[in-house]
Image (tube, rainbow, N blue to C red):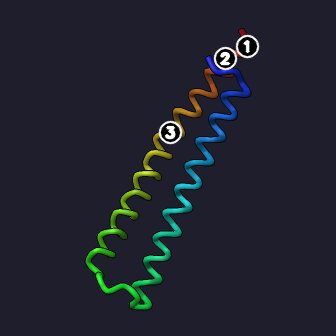
Amino acid sequence: MLKDEEYESRNHLIQWWDQAVTEELEKVNHSLDSALRQGQLACNHALESIRETVHLMQGEIETLKERLLPKEVEIDRLRALLSTW
């Protein structure tokens, strides 16, 4: 079982990674949008495919966040219950 400090560190790392991935996907999406608007990319089909993949990945991340939240609440509840023993 993880100690409180280990749990907090692990939880912080997961949140940091999630935020970093989300920010990087947003940067990629923004760069692709800018390139499309400026006409810098010749292969629009490939670009659209990449944009669609990035968009799908962002959606999956949001879905996972939504699914994770109730579990985090339940974990916190259980940790609080265990700490009273």
Q: Quadrant of the C terminus?
A: top right
Q: Identify which residue is drawn at 59% across, 53% down.
A: 19
Residue identified by numbered label 3: 68
Q: Nearer the viewer, residue 71 or 42?
A: 42
Residue 81 image label: 2
Q: What residue sits 44% from the left and 83% below the top?
A: 35
Residue farthest along the left direction in this orientation: 45
Picture quarter containing residue 56?
bottom left
Mark with earlier residue (1, 3): 3
Q: Give x and y (percent) for residue 47.
A: 33, 75
Viewer-proximal residue, 53 or 66? 53
Q: CA distance from mark 1 to mark 3?
A: 25 Å
At label 3, which amino acid type do we have?
Leu
Q: Residues within 10 Å of mark 3 (few under 14, many from 20)?
A: few
Q: Choose the circle earlier in sequence order: 2 or 3.
A: 3
Tell me where residue 16 appears, x and y as whole percent. 62, 48
Location of residue 61 with respect to 40 vertically, above or below: above
Label 1, secondary structure: give it.
loop
Asked if labels 2 and 1 touch by Cβ distance under 8 angstroms, the answer is yes
Q: CA distance from mark 2 to mark 3?
A: 20 Å
